[in-house]
Amino acid sequence: MLLVRALLLLWLPGCFTLTDSPEVRSPGRVSGPIGGSLTVRCGYDCGWKTDVKWWCRGAKWNSCRIMVKTTGSEDEQTSDRVSIKDSHRGCTITVIMDNLRAEDADIYWCGIEKAGTDLGAHVVMTINKDVSPPRGPEDVRVPVGGSLTVTCQYDPGWERNGKWWCRGANWRSSNIIVRTPGSKRNNEQMSIRDSPEKRAFTVTMDNVTERDADTYWCGIARAGDDFGARVRLDTFTDISSPKAVNGIEGQSLTVQCRYEQHYRANEKSWCRGAPWGNCQPVVSTGDHKNKGRNGKVSISDCPDNGTFMVTMENLSTSDTDTYWCRIGAEKVVLGFPVTVDVSRATTTMTTVTNPEMQSATNSSQKSQVSQNNSSAGFDLSRLELLLPLVFGVLLVVLVGVSILAWRMVRRQREASGKSATPSPTDEGLELPTTEVCYADLSIHHWINDDTGRTTGTPAPLARPRSAHQFVEYATLGSAKTEDVTCVTYSTVRRPRPAENPIYGNVELPCSPRRNNRKEAK
């Protein structure tokens, strides 16, 4: 009835008159969904910036009931379900009414308070009972281990209402998993974010498993019953991508991402950032294109075999991060995480003193750095396996050399023991084989007379003259076994003082041993 009364005031000219002040401008007519919210903006001449602004309800603005007003500043003021804010820079008044009801349909006024008669402009508000629920994808398919982004859109009037995401066949009896307002990530696996300026909210699910396949709802909270849109989620394992790839600084790497054929027409992209909902696009194929390039990163789609390739050139350590193979750009976006790790190029440093060798070493190092990914990246695990083997071989060789040296020393000792020279003995003595016997030492003296001639007569031992005595040495060595006796003589003669010494060795052949000493003589 209030709406009919307001329309009659406009449609029956001559009966009632709604006169707006030229200093204030309003949209004239507005409409909002029942249970939703409505935003009304009115402009005014900038000469009224510091004056109090108000929002009132009633057919005549000079007698309408003021619901909320400002204090002359830009601070927002709220009363019940209505708020007002004045913008001095834009010379506009913004009024927001939340949780609209059917009885809110009426005539309202944007006004400016001043001495005498206030200024105002009317606004006819209608309430739409036939509201549209949010709109989202009905069916989505997500790879196991990947991530999902679902965007649900809504009509004007629901910007200030809460949004939620729940799971279950009937959303009225299901538990809400995440909702707004609140933090962007309210759950370890899921998050929700509202974008009022786009009239859409986004739900993100990370690390999807087969157990996540179910019926979900994206909904809007309002007075009375909420309403939502159903989204059926299915998982599959047909999409594949390496979970981690390694690269060398200064070189290139390529990542292959696979997808199902019914995604062949969707946009393919490569984005960066560990949080799936916040990853920044790096390069994409664009609309109806199979290739794209952005700086040192390129992408190429092959719809015939259901793959797209991403190539990163001239790698640096700052490229280390989590990336995503991504399919889609609007309502449904699928993603699969790929960890990229870039390490520094390894070089072998050798210290040399020869300049030519130093130059050759530097050239070798430059050549090693410029090799491709497969030859430059040395596998340290192979070195860990080779080192114990090398040490084992060296230990075996060392033990073998030690044993060989010990045997050689032992043989030398045995040989020296066997070849020891037998001790001297008299001709007529019979001694054990291992004993040594020395012969008597005979000293013969030759004495020079006064004429300078030497006599052959030995002088007595008691009266030697050392200056003219000459000695003859004789040694006798014999070795006996059970049946054989061997004799060796060694003599040194000094016949005369002026003559040189005479050396002589006499070896008697071994003869059979006899029992009678006389026969030996």
Image: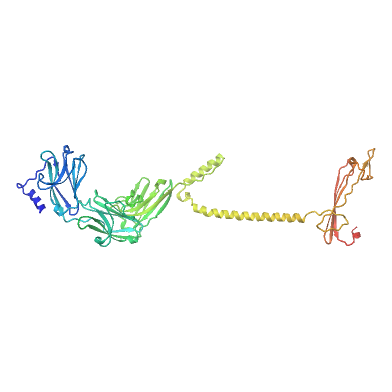
Q: Quadrant of residue 418?
A: bottom right
Across and down, in percent, residue 79 comes to 18, 48
**Residue 314 visible from this viewpoint:** no
Across and down, in percent, residue 321 comes to 39, 49
In the figure, is residue 463 to the left or right of 420?
right
In the figure, is residue 465 to the left or right of 329?
right
Residue at 32% across / 60% down in the picture?
212
Q: Assign the N terminus to one quadrant of the image.
A: bottom left
Q: Quadrant of residue 458?
A: top right
In the figure, is residue 251 to the left or right of 38?
right
Q: Assign the C terminus to one quadrant of the image.
A: bottom right
Query: Which is more toward the observer, 411 or 158?
Result: 158
- The way the protein has been coloured in the rendering is rainbow
**Residue 475 visible from this viewpoint:** yes
In the rendered image, the residue lying farthest to the top is: 47
Query: Which is more toward the observer, 182 or 282?
Result: 182
Across and down, in percent, residue 164 comes to 26, 55
Across and down, in percent, residue 147 comes to 33, 55
Query: Which is more toward the observer, 398 or 4?
Result: 4
In the rendered image, the residue lying farthest to the left is: 14
In the figure, is residue 4 to the left or right of 302?
left
Query: Which is more toward the observer, 327 or 425?
Result: 425
What is the count of numbered marks?
A: 0
